Structure formats: structure tokens, C-alpha cells
Amino acid sequence: MNKLISTLLSPFQNNSTKIITEKNILRQKVRELKSQITEVQKQKDADSVFNKIESLLEFKKAKTILIYWSSSDELPTHAIVEKWSCEKKILLPSVQGDDITIKRYDIKQKMTKGILGIWEPEISENYNEKIDLVIVPGVTFDLKKNRLGRGKGYYDRFLKHTKAPKWGIGFDCQLISSIPTNKQDVQMDKIITPSQIIE
């Protein structure tokens, strides 16, 4: 857990009039911390996180998993997506307008860069069937399983309408004691970092 961020935010907590400022402070501080992680360490952290995930019964039983195709500042997912796409139905998010739509990943298909610069499957069909598990990125998470995203609300709007377990994943520096929340923010069911699992 990052004590520096917790200390910086302590005067602001529970002050609803400054919630947007709080979130932006957090985003900037975590961005700075993540920029210090080497590529080698990123992959080690990803291996640790996904070793934990692969040992969990919910993951083993899940037939359809929504995950994300990682950007350079996120916990790497490319290897895990490719690995499990041969055994499970792997889904990736695609941003269309103000919302997330879901597309199935196929290692044989091309990927294309979406409107936010995020890579997604180059197919037109959206997936609208059951999802067994959602693995969610975030800017930061807290011990109460709250999640702070990039500020556009795409995931929160989508997650409100899914009953699947929601697991937030990230680097250790992305887990802090408390983050500010709004009523539209969706809590995770688990938070998984290289060093721990919050349930």
C-alpha cells in the first residue's frame, strides 16, 4: 500500500466538495509511481498477479472472461489473454461513443486501435451473452475494494449491468488505504496485486 498517497490525501478525505480534485491528485501521483516501474518488473508483477488468479476456483470454473488488452502503463495482460484464449472464451472491451461494448478475442484475428488508442479485436460483432468473470484495470484501488478509473466512467456504466464477479488488478503501488467515491462508482469483489488479495 502506498503510504505517500495516503498521507497526501488525508486532509481531503470525506470532503465531498473536493472529490474531483482528490481523484485528479490520485491519478497524477499514481501515474508518477507507475512511471518508475521497469518493463522487467512489470512482467514479474503480472506473472505474480496471474499466478494468483489462475489458482482461484472462480477463474478455473469461468468459461467466459472479460479482461483488457493492456496499455503501456497498465499491468501487462497480453500473454495471459493469448494463453487462455485457446481454452476459454476471452472478451475485450471496445469503446463506442460513451459506452463499452464487448468483443471476443481470437488470436488469429487482427487487432485495431480504438478511439481512445486502446487495441481491440477488429470485428464488428458485439458479444451480448453471459460473462462469468470480469478482470478490471484501474488507476488505483483501496482496501474497501473501491476503484478509481481514468475519469470517463466507461467501466462503471458497464459494470453496473453485469452480475459477474469483478476483480480489480494492478501493481502494488496502485493499492492505497482509501480513495474518494461517488454513488456511480462500482466496487470490486476482489483486488489482486503482486503481494496480496483483498476480498
Image (cartoon, rainbow, N blue to C red):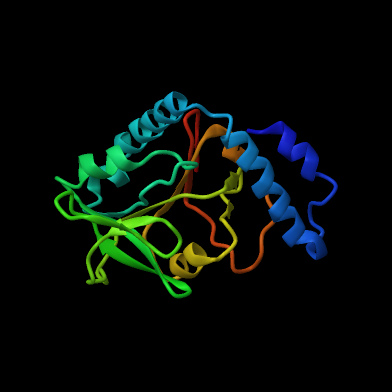
Residue located at (38% from left, 62% from top): 114
Depth check, front residue: 158 or 59: 158
Measured as percent of width and height from the top left, residue 172 is found at 55, 33
Give 28 or 61, whichever is nearer the viewer. 28
Horizontal and vertical percent position of residue 6: 74, 39
From the viewer's perspective, tell me whether residue 146 is left or right of residue 123. right
Left or right of residue 100, residue 107 in this image: left
Q: Quadrant of residue 29?
A: top right
Residue at 79 percent across and 63 percent down: it is 16
Relative image position of residue 94 (x, y in whole percent): 36, 64
- Asked if residue 86 is positioned above or below residue 151 in the image, the reply reads above
User: Is residue 199 or residue 91 the one in the foreground?
Assistant: 91
> Tag count in the figure?
0
Q: Is residue 41 left or right of residue 164?
A: right
Q: Nearer the viewer, residue 166 or 113?
A: 113
Q: Is residue 176 visible?
A: no
Q: Is residue 100 left or right of residue 80?
A: right
Residue placed furthest toward the bottom? 97
The answer, for residue 53, to whether it is visible in the render is: yes
**In terms of image quadrants, where is residue 77?**
top left
Rendered view: 12 above or below 175: below
Q: Could you tell me which quadrant the N terminus lies in?
A: top right
> Which residue is painted at 62% across and 34% down in the image?
33
Task: Tell me what residue is drawn at x 59 percent, y 46 percent.
Answer: 140
